[in-house]
Image (cartoon, rainbow, N blue to C red):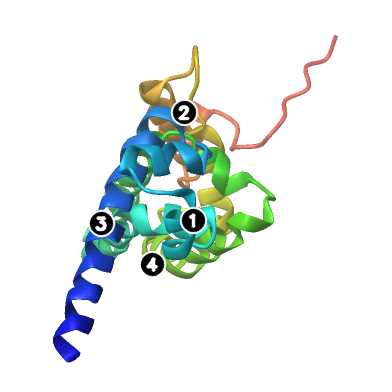
Amino acid sequence: MPQEGGVREAGTQRTRQVLLAAAAQTFVEQGVNAPMRAIAGRAQVGLGTVYRHFPNRAELVIAVYRHQIDECVDLAVELADSPDPRSALSRWADAFVEFLVTKHGLGAALQSEDASLHTLHSLMLDKLVPACGLLIDAAVARGQLDPSVKAYVLMRAIGNLCIVGPGYEREDARSMVARLLAGCWLGACLSNRQPACGTVIIHAG
C-alpha cells in the first residue's frame, strides 16, 4: 500500500509538471489571461485536472514564474553590498524589466484589480518589494537616490512601463524605465545649471 501511494504521488507530480510546461508555453503565446481550457488542451488533460492542481489562475501564474521571482530576489541580495548602489539598482531594474516584458501580459496582470490575482499581488509584495527596497536603501544611504523614492511605487511605475504591445515593444520599455530611473538620481537634473527635477520654469511673456 505505501508503494502504491508513492506511485500515485509520482503520477501527480508528473501531471503537475506537464501542466506547468503547458501553461508556460501558453502564456508566452497568449499572455497570462489565456483561457484555462487552452492550457488543459495543450497538456492533454481535462479542465478539472487543471483546477485540481491549481484552484485559480493566480496560483498557476505564480507556480510558472516563482523560479524567476526567486532569481530576482537572489539578485537583489547579491547586489545589495555593491560599492556602486546606482549601478546595482539599474542592473536589478533591468532584470525586473526583462522578467515582465518576456512574460506577455504579466505587467498588465500586476496592475489588475481582479480578485483572482490577489495572490500574485501578495507574492510580488512579499518578495520583490523588499528586494527592491534593499537596493533603494543602499542608494539613498550613499546619497545617490532621492529618499522619497519608495520600492512599491517604483515597481508599480516600472510595471506600467512594461505593458508592451503593438508600437511599444521590449526595447521601448527598457528605454523608458532607464529614463524613469534617471529622474530618481540626486543631481540628475542639476548638470549644466538646469532646473531640478520637477521644477517648472514660467517664462515672462
Residue, disc 1: 48
Three-letter residue code for mark 1? Gly
Check disc 1 and report its element: helix, strand or loop.
Answer: helix
- Which mark is first along the chain, 3 or 1? 3
Asked whether 116 or 109 is in front, the reply is 116
Cβ–Cβ below 8 Å for labels 3 and 4?
no
Instruction: Name the kind of residue labelled 3 in the image.
Output: Gln
Q: Crowding near pointer 2: few (<14 within 10 Å), some, many (20+)?
A: some
**Which SS class for mark 3?**
helix
Sequence order check, earlier mark of 1 and 4: 1
Residue 199: quadrant of the picture:
top right
Labels 3 and 2: the sequence-earlier one: 3
* Labels 1 & 4 near each other (Cβ < 8 A): no
Comparing 110 with 85, the one in front is 110
Q: Is residue 173 above or below residue 41?
A: above
Label 3 vs label 2: CA separation? 36 Å
Q: Which residue is mark 3?
A: 17
What is the crowding at mark 4: few (fewer than 14 residues within 10 Å), some, or many (at least 20)?
some
Q: Nearer the viewer, mark 1 or mark 4?
A: 1
The circle drawn on residue 134 is 4
Q: Residue at x 36, y 22 (%)?
A: 171
Q: Quadrant of the C terminus?
A: top right
